[in-house]
Image (cartoon, rainbow, N blue to C red):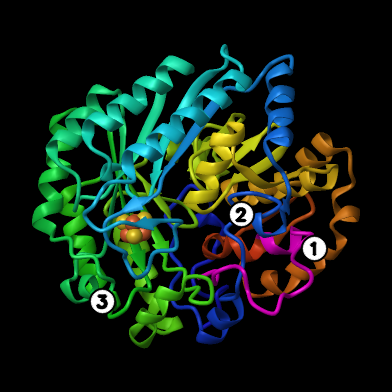
Amino acid sequence: MTAREAGTDRGAGMDCGLAIGHLSLDLLRRYNVPGPRYTSYPTAPVWKEGVGAREYEALLLESAREDEPRPLSLYLHLPFCEKLCYFCGCTVVITGSEHRLEDPYLSTLEREIDWVASRAGHRRPVVQLHLGGGTPTYFAPDRLEALLARLRDRFVFSSDAELGVEVDPRVTTPQHLAALARAGFNRLSMGVQDFDPQVQAAINRIQPYDDTRPLVEEAHRLGFPSVNMDLIYGLPYQTPVSFGATIDRVLEIAPDRLAVYSYANVPWMKKHQRILEPHLPGEAEKFGIFQTALERFQSAGFEYIGMDHFARPDDELARARRNRTLHRNFQGYTTKAGTDLIGLGMSAIGEVGDGYVQNARDLAPYRAAVEREGAATFRGVRLTADDRLRKSVIQSLLCHGVIVKAEIERDHGIDFDETFADALERLRPCAEDGLVELLPAEIRATPVGRVFLRNLAMPFDAYLTAPTERPVFSRTL
Ligand code: SF4
């Protein structure tokens, strides 16, 4: 059965449930190719090295001087974990139970916060803060509170700012949750991945359900308005049936949002992932696991936001998708469009004004650079007019599932069909496979095409034309 036969009727549309039915192995193989996740455009591998504190300072000052400066979104990278999960693709520092790097790291981070705050403009409200990692709750509760106090002292937070933190139930205590609630956090993102004991043993992450559930209950008791859970599909020993059992348990816990990430197997970049390779599910089985999640979460009342996210229909993420105000940045899907994203900490990425920057990816160079200059950026890019155009096309597709040609023509002063003749030609086979409709006024992902948004965006990426010897991106499914 082709994708077009498998439930791609227009009536299902963007606002209704997504049913993808059975897709042929041939189709899955053709579309399961290395491709960016488009949390930025241009994507990080094409950024240039040599973007240091001076260039970053210029970006910050220019953006702060604009007539209507954008509000701020802050991301802090807290990179430490006690143990390595074998699927991990993050930039982490594994320390075991010894926490002697904790305080020196916070001192460096505070210094970087001061440097950025004095250049980002004191009057620009912070509308979003996210602590990611690594494991933010690796840090003791009083350290996290002190960090928040420092940020509140240096920046002005809007009264309805969204304050989120990633929480690893294995090292998070009720005292952590109480400290985070006192500090004003209102979103918890809890790593679960899979509750199956065999999967947990294989990935080196033992996290019993009976430890996770009480933590969520405690979060609800403390009044956290939103609890998100992260799952991963495509891990060793997973099957649609075993993942279905994990989903049952997740639904018992009743989170508000869900992220169901595809396991990104990139052992040539993350060598520890080789351990997992002998027991990974095949392509068809992996997709079957995702399909199970899609069907089960939708029948439980969650809306499919796109890529890997689900939310309840009354959640602001779901509303933003329906209103076409959804945005995508390094934190994934967000409702906070039009901000400058300030990245703080080792390896953190920022999106400021017309550019992107990234901090040094290892601890020693990060600390040395901040001590020396106050900032630690080492690479970045300033967008050209062509980058801005393609960025908005890709954003539109990934966030709304549709590109309205007249909007792009109005915002960028181009003739869409002429400028993107090549991309439209490359999308033709996707249209024949039932993934996208190439209409006179718009390009619209079909319901089944919403699962393949990365593939549909790739023809608009000007930097993907030359294949590299070794893929720098994970596969799209
Ligand atoms: S807890 Fe998260 S960041 Fe730390 S090793 Fe596991 S997956 Fe990586």
Q: Disc 1, disc 2: CB below 8 Å?
A: no
| Distance between mark 3 and mark 2 Cα atoms | 29 Å
Q: Earlier in the sequence, mark 1 or mark 2?
A: 2
* Magenta stretch in the rendered image: 457-477
Nearest to the observer: residue 296 or residue 249:
249
| Distance between mark 1 and mark 2 Cα atoms | 17 Å
Q: Disc 3, disc 1: CB below 8 Å?
A: no
User: Depth-wise, is mark 3 or mark 1 nearer the camera?
Assistant: 3
Residue 97 in magenta? no
470 shown above or below 373 = below
467 shown above or below 88 = below
Q: Earlier in the sequence, mark 3 or mark 1?
A: 3
Which residue type does callout 3 highlight? Ala
Which residue type does callout 2 highlight? Tyr
- Residue 202: image tag: 3
- Residue 423: image tag: 1
* Horizontal arrangement in the rendering, residue 472 relative to residue 269 (left or right): right
